[in-house]
Amino acid sequence: MRPFVFCDIMFYMKNTLVLISGMDFSGKTTTVKEIKALEPDVVIRYRYLSDIAGNAARQEIVSIRESGNDVEKQRYRALARQSIEYDMKNYKPLNALVIQDTLFLLKHYSKRVLENTDHELIKWLEEQISLLPKMKSVFLTVGEEERKRRLDKRISDGERLAKTDKLLIEEPKKFFEIGDLYFKVVLKHFPDTKVIDTTQLTPKQVAQEVLDFLR
């Protein structure tokens, strides 16, 4: 029998969705780029299952973040809910191997559970999670020292810091609380999740571990 190479994965794993989760600086986006470099036919989705081009609420969230302006909490939650509603309604399986870089629904849910103030919203989010399509799951982790090194590099390179990046600097305790809960949420809904510690691995090695998991 001939070896099972990556092109076989592309053939046999059409209509397959692979979720890559992890907190900031765990290497999610870098890993996704490495996979894309290895196989250009892989379809990449970021944060949402569907194409975000028509997701007006999502576009407004992006604009707010890029502007650096604060937004009233209830307004943000309303936009988040609208963006999730749009995403779930408009998701359509693709005849391709799809790599999903993070799922906004799961991370948003984790943050709301940690706050534990809006029980109606939490219940609604749980209902949406129960409707998620079948997918394989990978969760990336990283050691604290390596995470700090990656954060320092992002700052020295002059890259814009996301809200959760700033949270790591300003409220590290809350950052790790969200991370721990996020990890538990992913494992609860995807018990066969492959956990990969990226601390001492190159991006290419992490990408290869993901591909090995899919074989």
Image (cartoon, rainbow, N blue to C red):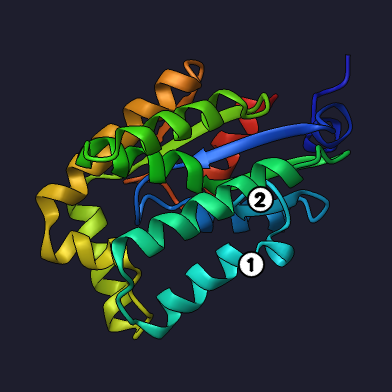
| Residue highlighted by disc 2 | 86
The residue located at (35%, 48%) in the rendering is 23
Instruction: Name the quarter where the C terminus is drawn.
Output: top right
Above or below residue 61? Residue 110 is: above
Q: State the separation of the CA atoms marked 2 and 1.
A: 9 Å
Of residues 194 and 209, which is closer to you in this image?
Answer: 194
User: In the structure shown, which secondary structural element does the residue marked by tag 2 occupy?
Assistant: helix
Amino acid of disc 1: Ala
User: In the structure shown, which secondary structural element does the residue marked by tag 1 occupy?
Assistant: helix
Above or below residue 52? Residue 62 is: below
Horizontal and vertical percent position of residue 159: 38, 80
Image check: 14 left or right of 48? right
CB-based contact (under 8 Å), mark 2 and mark 1: yes
The residue located at (55%, 23%) in the rendering is 130
Above or below residue 111? Residue 77 is: below
The residue located at (62%, 29%) in the rendering is 132
* Mark closer to the chain start, 2 or 1: 1
Horizontal and vertical percent position of residue 94: 84, 41
Give the label on residue 56, or none. Answer: 1
Amino acid of disc 2: Tyr
Horizontal and vertical percent position of residue 134: 67, 24
Of residues 113 and 184, which is closer to you in this image?
Answer: 113
